[in-house]
Structures are given as C-alpha cells and as structure tokens.
Amino acid sequence: MARKPTEYVQLKLRVRESLRRKLERAAEKKAHSANAEAVARIEYTFADEEEWEARAKEMEERRDEIDQQHREWLEEEAKREAEHQTALRDSRLLTFMVGSDDNVTLVRAIMHLINEHPDWNKDAEERIRLGLKIQEFLTHANDVFQGQIK
C-alpha cells in the first residue's frame, strides 16, 4: 500500500558529527527539536529551489519579449541614423546649391516659416499671409546677417 504525501515517515541520514552539532545548536536557539530544525531546513531548500526555478522560467518567457524590444530599438536607431545621414546630405547639397553658409541659413529660415504655415497653399489669403511673413523676415535679415547675404 502506497503512503500518503502528508504521512510522516522516518528517514535515517548519515551526517558528519560537526553538522549534527550545528543542527543541535540551531534547534536549541529556536527552542525546538533537532528533527524539526532539520525538516525546516530541508523544506526551505526545496522552496528556495522552486522559487529559483520559477524565476528562471519567467526570465526565459520574457526573453522573447526583451529580444523583440531590442530588435525594435535597433530598427528605430537605424531609422534615426538614416534620417540623420539624409539631413547631412541635404545640408551639403543645399550649401553647394545656394553658396555661402549665410544663404543656407536664410533658405532654412524661410523653410521654417513655410513649415509653420502648413496651409499656406490653401487659398490666396494664406499665401498672402505667408508672403508677408517672409517679406518681414527678409526685411530684418539684413540686420541679422549684417549685410553678408549674397
């Protein structure tokens, strides 16, 4: 007949005398038997092992998620780098086409004004409004660049 998991059974162990003494001292400190101390310590090691196994399993389960997040981050970084390289190329082209750095700055400032008014091409009134903003900017640009605009 098989024993029930909750049934108490006797287990004979052979241990070094020094370990038996440590067990006795620990049991005395807690005011219980050496048997109770030994059982508690054995149960603790199994519970600890189960906890570590659960953590390892959780980490393994999250590994795919973390790997996916890493791949997405790498893709975003590659995209940002490509955008940066494109911006550098465009900047070099703009400098080549327009000439001096002051002229490039002027063109960029005008482009910024256009970007601030995305509906500039919607109707004549918006075009006039943007034109006036650009005219105002150009009027003051000479002061900004100190007459160096070519």
Image: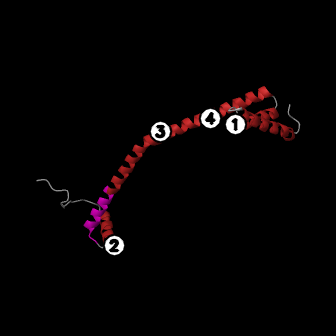
Which is more foreground, mark 2 or mark 3? 3
Q: Position of residue 47 (x, y in %)?
A: 32, 56
Instruction: In the rendered structure, find residue 81 and report the number of the disc placed on it.
Output: 4
Q: Is any part of residue 108 visible from this angle?
A: no
What residue is shown at x 54% (from left), y 39% (from top)?
73
Distance, label 2 to label 3, CA atoms, is 52 Å
Which tag, 2 or 3, sits closer to the chain's start? Answer: 2
Instruction: In the rendered structure, find residue 14 and report the number of the disc placed on it.
Output: none
Q: Position of residue 30 (x, y in %)?
A: 32, 71
Residue 36 magenta: yes
What kind of element bears circle 4?
helix
Tell me the amino acid under the disc marked 3.
Gln
In the picture provided, is 110 more to the left or to the right than 46? Answer: right
Give, as a single range, the part of the protein colored magenta.
Answer: 32-46
Distance, label 1 to label 4, CA atoms, is 23 Å
Which tag, 1 or 4, sits closer to the chain's start? Answer: 4
Instruction: In the rendered structure, find residue 115 and report the number of the disc placed on it.
Output: 1
Distance, label 2 to label 4, CA atoms, is 65 Å
Tell me the amino acid under the disc marked 1.
Asn
Residue 66 magenta: no
Q: Nearer the viewer, residue 64 or 6?
A: 64
In the picture provided, is 1 more to the left or to the right than 43? Answer: left
Residues at circles 2 and 4 in contact by the CB criterion of under 8 Å: no
Distance, label 3 to label 4, CA atoms, is 20 Å
Tell me the amino acid under the disc marked 4.
Glu
Residue designated by label 2: 29
Which tag, 3 or 4, sits closer to the chain's start? Answer: 3
Residue designated by label 3: 68
